[in-house]
Amino acid sequence: MRAGDGPDARGGDADGGDDDALGTDYASLATELAERDAVGFVAVGDRFDDDLRWLTRFSGPDRNYAFVATDAPGSDSHGDDAGDSGDDPDESPDGDAAGDDTATDDLHTALCAPALFDEQARREFPGEAVLTDRQGDHAGVRAAAALSARGVDGGTVLVPQSIPHDAAVYLSDAGYEVASTDAIARARRTKTDAEIDRLRRVQRAAIRGVARAEAILAEATPDPDADDGAGAVRWNGGALSTERLRRQVNEVLAAHGVRDAGNTVIGAGATAADLHYTGTDAIRPGETVLLDVSPRGPDGYYGDVTRTFAVDPDGGWERRAYLAVERAREAALAEVAAGVPASTVHEEAAAELAAHGFRVDSDAVGFTHSTGHGVGVSLHEGPSLSADEPLAAGDVVTIEPGVYDPGEGGVRLEDLIVVADDGYDLLGEYPFSLVPRRREGSQPHRQP
């Protein structure tokens, strides 16, 4: 096991670095087409469709566009209509022959993009052709026209299960037999070095957000005017709430080039037992404060880190739960390696929590979720650590055991790792402590 960079590491955030360019290897898609005797593949969606983002590396727009792949080169139809840029279809924006790296096993790819985004599409898309003709037609119609232009006028076309229904209907009306495939979800599992670099950078920014939160909590003090210490703790002249703390975390994320994407989960006390709490609650002395920070970087990849703290804890449920979750995390990590069934990792974490007296496989109290999940251009993707399938080198997964009790609070500890042949690598590292501490280089921002 090798650790990632700590919270005080400098450089390499999501908005910097000289790393390998992202690309997409279509070899697995070519194999799927051959094995299914299919004439092509079509994906239709917008910038919120993660499969399409992975296939095209195209980051916009919020209107539907299409990706088309076929093993028939046919004749390109770019440049024939007014919406096209007029570039040579056989040349990339840099003047090199387009598609040399992506016509894998004679697989030819095209992106049917909105004309307004032509330049961006040509810059971001790693495939051969950017088609901007027939702008008034539905993306499914344009995809069918692109297949026809390649000389493919019938046969089986594979599509992701998430393809919009109307796009599938247009393909069917054009004479193609539409069949679904999970080839893209499977291909997305194994991360390349360039993808791991993006994940590591976003995780580093997420860790800095946690560091900001811990520094603030370390400075927070119980309100001396509250009865029995039941009021919110105070920081920088005012009561500290989950929303106030969330704003501070999100400010750090933005400063390091990533978006919070609505995923900064902070709960306190009872709301710390809510797995995805993004509301406003008071932070009170002795209660657990759970911070799950999952930002998205500029290339679409996510980070995911969770730590739990308590201001002035009394040594009761929260300490027992924290110790149990720490031990469960260690037990889970000890099982991680390529070839190990994913469910084994979960079972070891659950066994450790049960040994500490916490319920497992419960819907409301105790350990209520899987030990982890895959992370990439989706915050939750394959593999799930509750599945029986073996882990593979290049899988990027979270390790996040936790225990919850609405009457007590919640404790979760989460890190992001990449599976290796003989173990795992941490994609970022941050210390563990139930009591928040002031750490060197992690100073809280003070509001005026």
Image (cartoon, rainbow, N blue to C red):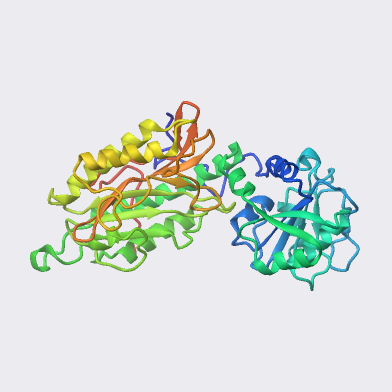
In x, y percent, where is residue 288? 23, 55
In the image, is 309 to the left or to the right of 193? Answer: left
Query: Observer-nearest residue: 393 or 252?
Result: 393
Residue at horizontal 78%, vertical 38%? Answer: 105
Residue at horizontal 86%, vertical 48%? Answer: 73
Q: Is residue 448 visible?
A: no
Q: Where, quadrant-wise, is the N terminus in this rendering?
A: top left
In x, y percent, where is residue 253? 45, 55
In this rendering, the answer to whether 220 lies above or below 136 is above
In this rendering, the answer to whether 72 lies above or below 389 is below
Q: Where, quadrant-wise, is the C terminus in this rendering?
A: bottom left
Residue at horizontal 89%, vertical 51%? Answer: 74
Residue at horizontal 83%, vertical 57%? Answer: 154
Query: Observer-nearest residue: 27 or 245?
Result: 27
Residue 329 quadrant: top left
Query: Observer-nearest residue: 245 or 352?
Result: 352
In x, y percent, where is residue 389? 49, 39
Q: Is residue 195 visible?
A: yes
In x, y percent, where is residue 422? 46, 26
Residue sitting at the far top? 422
Query: Observer-nearest residue: 156 or 13?
Result: 156
